[in-house]
Image (cartoon, helix red, strand yellow):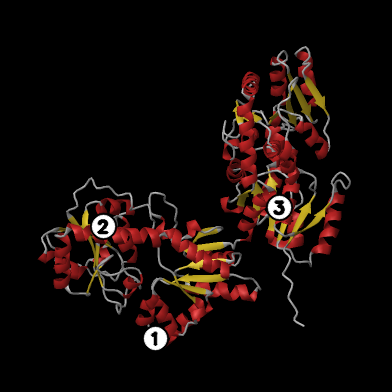
Amino acid sequence: MQNSKKPKIKRVLFFGIFDPKYSRSRVLREGFEALGYEVVTCQTNPKENPGLRKYNVLWKKGRALRAEQFDHVFVLFPGHTVVWLARILFGNRIIFDAFVSLYDSNVCDRALYTSFSPRAIKDRFLDSISCTLSHYVLVDTKENKSYFVEKIGVSENKIIVVPVGAGTKWFTAGENIESLHGDQLIVGFYGSYIPLHGISTIVRAAHLLAEERIFFRIIGGGQEYDKVKALVKKLGGVPNIEFIKSMPRDELIKNIREMDICLGIFGETEKASRVIPNKVYECAAFGKPIITADTPAIREVFTNKENILLTEAGSANELAKTIRDCIADYGRATRTASRARNLMLKSYTPEKIVRNLDEKISAKKVAFLFSKARGDKSEPDTSFRGANHIPNAEIIVVERGVIKTLKIIFKLIRYDVVVASDYFTIGYIVTFLSRLLRKKTYWIFIAMHSSTLMRKHSKHTIRIYLLKMFWKSFARIICLSRAQYKDFEDFGVSPEKLEFIHFGIDKDFYTNTTDKHKRENIVSVGRDSARDYKTLFKVADKIKHKFVIVSAHKNIPDNIQIPENVSLKYNLPASGVRKIYETARIAVVAVEDDNFFYGSDCSGQTVILDAMSAGVPVIVTKRAWIRDYFIPNKDIVVVSCGDAEVLATEIKKLWNSSDERAHIASSAKHKVLDMYTTEKFANKLNSVITTL
């Protein structure tokens, strides 16, 4: 009889002092269960176990679970005070659902105490330390993410936006909703009496509508209840409002079923502009028309008059007007509500919300190593090597110095994958230490100069030994040509470690060049050490057309005679190169042959792809990598290396044939934009990462 191995059940732990019945907790639980996770809780009620007792209870429960395996460990909201305990119990993999800032809620929004009081200082500390100790921090909106980055100092890469959404019961309840009441219209609100909700605005609006057969139902209680009741008294009574105490969810759903319009929030605090309350999501799932304040946060999800009705925060007059307009064209309001429910079903069910979250937290944490900072939006994204298109990828700049290098090494061990095109020694040490410490840090090496190094050091036994040791220690080696792949195989590197991926460039940066300039130049760009400008200068002597060469000073020998028709531009930024491509009739890339001891293995690769994306036909001297990307005489013209006569002849032929230029430029451009972009490169690189 054959034994079938049972599939591993995924498990998630919810830790803290959270309320299991709170909407946020319900959505996360329902979502994980819908994805097939077993949800385990380690929770205590702080009202039943106040003060230090709650820590003791959580410690005992947590210790009993330490030996168990969990795919993810969450500290649920409100968990600011217990993240440190979860960190002690379960290590550095804590995912903290911060949801909101304690300081922002208690000081800025609710004004429970002043900003420099001991309790405010404590809230600031808890906001900071709880996020610092967590692997990921969850918030509910992009606006809240910005707050955590700017005010609390949390790394942007550490924060994940997880919308509130609505629990399954709200969607089920909305399957058969009742139509508009004939005798009395009910406008309803439910929630706590806090400044964020702006219940005073609702009361004033109700007062303005007291004579219009519109009845208000406000369900809840809390901080500002007495203040609201005092306002009612000051207004001389508001007979069309019914105040009802908080109630269980099932009873609340029955009440909402009777409401014709549901209200969101109308507070004027800063926090009110950064959140989307659970009641808005829930009523949208229910399929009820919703009116709420117009804020940056609400517009992250909803669209005014498309699936929600927005009004000015804090304005009773505007709220009253919006309610009147809604009732006057209730058919339009119900269509808005229907679209809101469809939006919720499409994107904000517990399963959809948690699936998006699960993909992000399950993705490997990736670091890309560079010698210089990246991020200038005025330059193409080619230099990122795909980092900006890979989830959870961070860029780390390696600074010089022994102490700084040691810090980098121990920092890199915390990542799942490190991607670099250099730093052999660091890669070897990180790989060795990760094994020693029983961690899993995989090093991916993008080969740029590998074949050149093999040839250059072929007679140096120690150097060759070190290269083999470094490369064999890496998890994967990304080859940008088949020639590189074969060189690694011949060098003794296992094919299991090798991957061939076509390189890619920024598809948009050069594509937007204009034709306002006359294309009268022959352009050559490149600073790689394998450039052959001596041959190109000989060609310029034979052809009297203007040449524009963009290079570095190191590429041009001091004793060489520069032809009069050659204009040299040194170290131009990419934006300057783009302007030069706008004047190019032909791009020429002259390189040394594959046996040259200097420069990159695929010399000319980036500038050739750039020129093609700009719609410029390219002539290149022969390199092995070119046939991996293009078909000669269809996408590109290829000539022998170092032969000025042949190169000059091909330039003349292409210069004089507009049809041939157009044919080659069009074929190459379509191929580059379809196959050789940074996004394509990143997708294939990410596929390699996910297999590790």
Q: Position of residue 219 (x, y in %)?
A: 79, 29
Q: Is residue 540 above or below residue 345?
A: below
Q: Secondary structure at mark 1?
A: loop
Question: Mark 1 is on which residue type?
Answer: His
Q: Real-space Cα distance between discs 2 and 3?
A: 51 Å
| Eye-nearest disc, 1 or 2 | 2
Q: Is residue 137 above or below residue 228?
A: below
Q: Secondary structure at mark 3?
A: helix
**Residue indicated by mark 2:** 616
Q: Where residue 460 is drawn, which disc sits there?
A: 1
Whether the residues at callouts 1 and 2 have beta carbons within 8 Å, the answer is: no
Q: Who comes first in sequence, dot 3 or dot 1? A: 3
Q: Who comes first in sequence, dot 1 or dot 2? A: 1
In the depicted view, which residue is nearer to us: 286 or 487?
A: 286
Question: Mark 2 is on which residue type?
Answer: Val
Q: Where residue 494 is drawn, which disc sits there?
A: none
Q: Secondary structure at mark 2?
A: loop
State left or right for residue 391 relative to residue 385: right
Q: Where residue 31 is drawn, which disc sits there?
A: 3
Q: Position of residue 115 (x, y in %)?
A: 69, 35
Write the residue at 22% across / 52% down.
583
